[in-house]
Amino acid sequence: MKDLIVKCFNISKSYGNIKALTDINLNIEKGELFGLIGPDGAGKTTLFRIMASLILADSGSAFVDNLDVVKDYKALRRHIGYMPGRFSLYQDLTVEENLIFFAKIFNTSIKENYHLIENIYKHIEPFKNRMAGKLSGGMKQKLALSCALIHKPSVLFLDEPTTGVDPVSRKEFWEILGKLKAQGITIIASTPYMDEANLCDRIALIQHGKILSVETPQKITAAYGKKLYRINAADNFALLTQLRGNPEVASCLLFGGYLHVTFKNDADTSIPNLEITEPSVEDCFIELMTKSND
């Protein structure tokens, strides 16, 4: 049996009449880089906050590093690092002061665990005397990650860490996560960006508080149940309207500069410039979401 570091059993949570999570069951293996993939409002942050012992579930139970997130919440917080989606460090403290503060909370020091954050902190160390509120988005991200790591957690929760960050900083951040994984830290990252799913060992696709699938990105795309085609034109929106009016077309969606098309039976060969393509995680997400709504 694989070594599980996170276990969720039938987790449900509502806010008034809004069901944020419904019967979530999830197992995450030790040492994984695990992605929780879904759009805004899917339930990602609520699930993270429950696993990090910040809020209580209405029902169900969760264990992180063999600790009950309710009964053992004090001990749990020494085992986890949590980086919320919104920058929440002290903006009127300097970079270095923020890091010293978080180290002292956990009775450690920057010197003791510098090896954990070196690859991250070296990018912002030249600005260690700058107020955190004056940092760019990418630098704030690196500081928040350094503060989440300074006490040497075994599990790192990252809630939409690259939202609002420029493409170069996004790429750098995921390279950093790969290096942290190599140090044996279990990383659980949520993101609305479907392209980031391919950077994870396994992913859970979540929508409307329900998990649609949990697998490797490769297995999820391999399970796509239809032949997928792509096509583009000078006016993709006009083409979109035209294809959606074709009785043989099962689905037609805009993906970047192309339309992705599936057919009820065989492909309509009368459509010019139609070519077969490989499904992405986003294609699979939409297909699973459609099935769950049927």
Image (tube, rainbow, N blue to C red):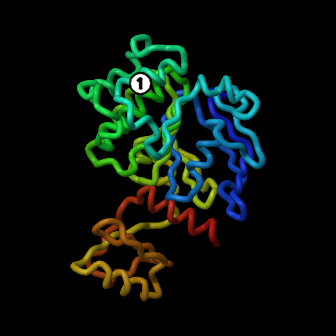
Q: What residue appears at the point 40 percent right and 42 percent down from the top-left corner?
A: 199
As drawn, is 85 to the left or to the right of 258? Answer: right
Quarter of the image with the N terminus is top right
Taking depth in this image into account, of 18 and 65 the one nearest to the observer is: 18
Taking depth in this image into account, of 200 and 153 the one nearest to the observer is: 153
Q: Is residue 163 above or below residue 34?
A: below
- Residue 291 image position (x, y, % from top left): 60, 67
Q: Secondary structure at mark 1?
A: helix
Q: Is residue 214 above or below residue 238?
A: above
- In the rendered structure, which amino acid carries the disc numbered 1? Leu
In the rendered image, the residue lying farthest to the left is 234
Q: Quadrant of residue 283?
A: bottom left
As drawn, is 50 to the left or to the right of 38? Answer: right
In the rendered image, the residue lying farthest to the front is 92
Taking depth in this image into account, of 118 and 101 the one nearest to the observer is: 101
Quarter of the image with the C terminus is bottom right
- Residue 148 image position (x, y, % from top left): 47, 29
Q: Is residue 152 above or below residue 289?
A: above
Residue 174 visible? no
**How busy is the neighbourhood of tag 1: few (under 14 within 10 Å), some, or many (20 plus)?**
many
- Residue 188 image position (x, y, % from top left): 52, 38
The residue that disc 1 covers is: 99
- Residue 167 image position (x, y, % from top left): 28, 48
Q: What residue appears at the point 36 percent right and 51 percent down from the top-left corner?
A: 164
Q: What residue appears at the point 66 percent right and 36 percent down from the top-left corner?
A: 53
Q: Quadrant of residue 71?
A: top right
Q: What residue appears at the point 72 percent right and 61 percent down from the top-left corner?
A: 16
